[in-house]
Image (tube, helix red, strand yellow):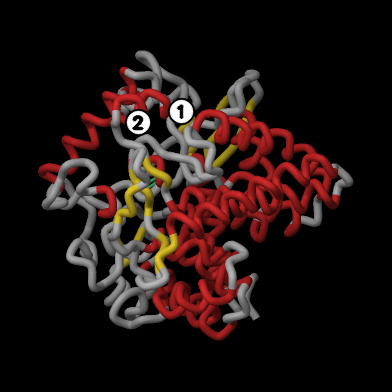
Amino acid sequence: MNADDLRGPALQVLSDNRRSGVGLAGQPVSFSWPSPATYPFQWFWDSCFHAIALAHLHPEWAIEELEALAASQQPDGFIPHVTFHGGARMSYWAFVQGRGFRPRRSAMIQPPVFGYAVCRVGELLDDDALVERLLPAVDAYHDWLFRERDHDGDGLISIITPYESGMDHKPAYDAALGSRSGQARTLTPRLRRLDIDNKRRGFSLAENVRRGRFHAEDVIVNTFLGLSLEAAAEAHQRLGQAEAATKARDRAERLLGALLKKSWDPEAGLFWELYGAEEQALKTATISGLTPLALGLPREVVERLVDTLTNPGRFWPAYPCPSVALDEPAFDAGSPYSVRSPLIWRGGTWVNTNWLLHLGLRRHGYHDIADELCRRTQDLIRQSGFREFFNPFTGKGYGASSFGWSTLVVDMAANSR
Ligand code: GLC
């Protein structure tokens, strides 16, 4: 699908947002901020998405973006959701979401896209040496996730704050946080309290399980881990590293099996986030519940998911796919982000989730729907620019401008017929 007119502007965004910093070993690194005016610093899943887009636009920068992530990996394998590169100032992300007084990095995770990004960039650049160089970082990261975040050993990992889902205020967690109304008035203070509590307890899943505090097996987080494990398994196989390939493949299969067994609801046609030690299904229909479409699901599950996705009353308005189903009470088409309207991921359309669903539609052979989703995503950008998210009825752009991961539209187009 032709998106040549978007390539120049996309590269301009990532170039305007480009900054430099210092890796853990003191090495110079380069990467793009998500948005100069709104989101400074290097963010984990944003960087992965930037790298994938840059593989089409500026290969050298794509490699540098991935290397910058690897350079922020801690000796135990952890990779932070934000790395401040010396410029933390007194931001909330540093002060509350990192350890100590003036942290160099946050102590939280984001959806684990890293393994997939490394392999996708390697494939686009036909650069197996790059993949071989970065796979050890990917494997160490996955080891960390399973060691620290799979308390019940079921193959699904847990988050300890909704922010770790990457979908900050997704309404599935309103009730778990104790906010029945889902209004910023009650939600924001509760999220702050949870963050402060996590900081005091060392950002530890084990602590949250022990004390019955927030922990959830989040669907989009586990989908990205599944994709990354699959990609790593394939890469190891290709490179003749059979043992590592088997380990990653076994983990991917267990993860998918657990998702199907515990989180899939055939009647609803969606996967649910699983909350707390009881793994309570949180039955709020958000786009997170559609994302396992990107994995190797059985045919009947795929068909149900595609029905849900293309239902005009749920996830298929003029500008699909809204982050919350249109028929959910919590659905909000969005408004310009402001002090009075500070909540996000409550109904707006985002490019990174469209990109992920597009991947799934292609994987399972739904090329016409995938093309349509790609076309409408391109229309959003042509109409409103590289904004953070969009009104699903009008296409109006909201949130941050010059937003890095909206350039993923370039990968969607390249991955179309
Ligand atoms: C918002 C998003 C988060 C993203 C960050 C930087 O907080 O919810 O997922 O990583 O912005 O773009």
Cβ of mark 2 under 8 A from ligand 1: no
- 33 to 412, vertically: above or below: above
| Extreme residue in the right direction | 240
| Extreme residue in the bottom direction | 368
- Left or right for 108, reference 185: right
Residue 329 locus on image (x, y percent): 17, 65
Q: CA distance from mark 1 to mark 2?
A: 9 Å
- 35 to 256, vertically: above or below: above
Quadrant in which residue 82 is drawn: top left
- 148 to 202, vertically: above or below: below
Q: Quadrant of the C terminus?
A: bottom right
| Residue at image coords 38%, 14% | 100
Residue 416 visible to an observer of this rendering: yes
| Residue at image coords 77%, 46% | 246
- Mark 2: amino acid: Trp
Q: Which residue is mark 2?
A: 93
Q: Which residue is mark 1?
A: 84
Label 1: element kind: loop
